[in-house]
């Protein structure tokens, strides 16, 4: 192989290696920032990973909201009408948060099966429900009929 072709080959291989490293780093960064959605049924069945940030959603169960008297600690139950999951949150809940409404919580599942949330998102008008919650309720056959 002549020296010019050898030099071109090394340049092409160097560029390909650089692109492969860049793609690998980008995929690693994206994978660490992904928040997969799990329904209460999936969480109760053990399908959700512990100590990994996930999104969970459903309807806030009536009568389940427990607020701490001396802190911003709140515990409530989210249901997809098949299974329930307890969510623990420390902070101010959104103004539109209330029992019987759809929410999505972001946080980590602890060893007791409680989702320790660092963010709670509530619907923003009377007809809106997060798409993941709508799909989960539709799959369980519990989506209220619109009429």
Image (cartoon, rainbow, N blue to C red):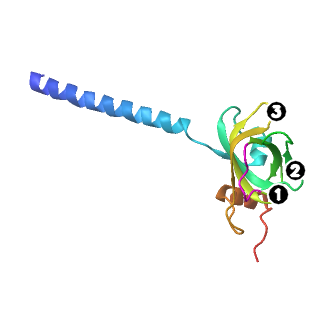
Quadrant containing the N terminus is top left
Q: Is residue 39 above or below residue 138?
A: above
Q: Nearer the viewer, residue 20 or 68?
A: 68
- Residue at (80% x, 39% y) in the render: 71
Residue designated by label 2:
64
- Residue at (43% x, 32% y) in the render: 25
Q: Which SS does the magenta portion mostly show?
A: loop
Quadrant containing the C terminus is bottom right
Q: Residues within 10 Å of mark 1 (few under 14, many from 20)?
A: some
Note whether residue 95 is visible: yes
Please tell me whether mark 3 or mark 1 is closer to you in this view.
1
Distance (Cα) linking label 3 and label 2 = 18 Å
Q: Are dots 2 and 1 in contact, CB under 8 Å?
A: yes
Disc number placed over residue 81 in the picture, else none: none
Residue designated by label 1:
99
Instruction: From the viewer's perspective, tell me whether residue 146 is left or right of residue 131.
Output: right
- Residue extending farthest front: 70
Residue 133, percent from left and from top: 71, 56
Q: Nearer the viewer, residue 68 or 38?
A: 68
Q: Quadrant of residue 81?
A: bottom right
Residue designated by label 3:
112
Residue 123, percent from left and from top: 69, 60
Among the two numbered marks 3 and 2 on one chain, the one whose residue lies closer to the N terminus: 2
User: What stretch of residues is rendered in magenta?
Assistant: 91-97
Q: Nearer the viewer, residue 44 or 91?
A: 91
Distance (Cα) linking label 3 and label 1 = 23 Å
Distance (Cα) linking label 2 and label 1 = 8 Å
Q: Check if residue 143 falls in the magenta segment.
A: no
Q: SS for tag 2?
A: loop
């Amino acid at each position: 192989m002549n020296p010019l072709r050898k030099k071109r080959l090394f340049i092409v291989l160097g560029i390909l290696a650089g692109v492969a490293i860049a793609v690998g780093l980008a995929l690693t960064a994206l994978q660490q920032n992904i928040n997969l959605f799990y329904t209460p049924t999936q969480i109760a069945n053990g399908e959700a990973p512990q100590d990994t940030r996930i999104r969970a959603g459903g309807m806030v169960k009536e009568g389940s909201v427990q607020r701490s008297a001396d802190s911003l600690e709140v515990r409530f139950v989210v249901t997809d009408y098949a299974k329930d999951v307890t969510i623990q949150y420390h902070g101010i809940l959104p103004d539109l948060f209330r029992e019987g409404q759809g929410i999505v919580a972001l946080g980590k599942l602890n060893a007791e099966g409680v989702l320790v949330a660092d963010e709670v998102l509530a619907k923003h008008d009377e007809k809106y429900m997060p798409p993941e919650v709508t799909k989960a309720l539709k799959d369980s056959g519990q989506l209220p009929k619109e009429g």
